[in-house]
Amino acid sequence: MRVLLTLLLPMFFFISTTKAMHSPTSSPNTTRRFLALGDSYTIGESVDPSERWPSLLVAKLRAVGIQIEDALIIAKTGWTTDELNAAIDKESPTEPFDIVSLSVGVNNQYRGRTPEEYRIQFEALLDRAIRFARNDPTRVFVISIPDWGVTPYAEGRDRRRIAREIDEYNRINKKLTEARGASYIDVTPRSRDAANDLSLLTSDGLHPSRILYEEWAALAYPIVKRISNNKSKR
């Protein structure tokens, strides 16, 4: 009997190890799920759905053989942090997701909300994003708030004040993102080039054009590719 157990135990270990190695959750062929949370910059106001940065990112990943679903986008033009949070409650997306992005705050600034309120609400959203991402902050990335103050839409407004407030909001979201161990993509400096290059904006004179969204997708690509590669090795 002891001889039989001695022979069976190594065999059981081999079978268990083999199953783990070929588990669907660790296979590089597993289809990834992507949740994009945000406002007008995530939904791609005034551009074709195919030109939204989440759509462009998915296309880049598929081009190199990474299997990924179309992004589930919970975003709407004009949403503040609290409105995004309420929308997530209403949509109730099914967990888990392999990749989660978060980009929100411009409408808090536009409406004159306080930085402290933004900090509290953004932190709650970031923690929620991490929970959606299997409680793994390395699966989450945050995109900074662009500076709309340089656009034609801001004509007649205090552009310097807008820039200062956007910078303050971004200091908050960057600090929280880095503290959690998630990735941060700073698109704000490049957004300010729109002051002298209207091709970076859509015809509404406010929102980014495909040119900028292509750049955002390119910046997110190595982060998401690394996430996909690292998780497939587990």
Image (cartoon, rainbow, N blue to C red):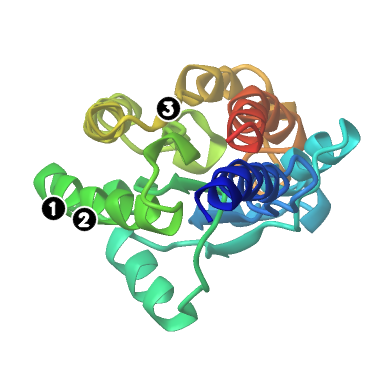
Asked if residue 78 is positioned above or below residue 150 in the image, the reply reads below
Residue linked to disc 3: 184
Mark 2 or 3: in front is 3
Residue 95 percent across, percent down from the top left: 50, 67
Q: Amino acid at mark 3?
A: Tyr
Depth check: 88 or 40 in front?
Answer: 88
Residue furthest to the bottom in view is 90
Crowd rating for badge 3 (residues with CA inside 10 Å; few <14, some 14–19, many 20+): many
Residue linked to disc 2: 121
Residue linked to disc 1: 117
Mark 1 or 2: in front is 2
Crowd rating for badge 2 (residues with CA inside 10 Å; few <14, some 14–19, many 20+): some
Residue 186 percent across, percent down from the top left: 46, 23
Q: Amino acid at mark 2?
A: Gln
Q: CA distance from mark 1 to mark 3?
A: 21 Å
Residue drawn at x 22%, y 48% as measured from the top left:
123
Q: Looking at the image, do the residues carrying marks 1 and 2 touch, with CB atoms under 8 Å apart?
A: yes
Disc tally is 3
Q: Which corner quadrant of the image does residue 167 belong to?
A: top left
Q: Is residue 189 visible?
A: yes
Asked if residue 36 is positioned above or below residue 177 in the image, the reply reads below
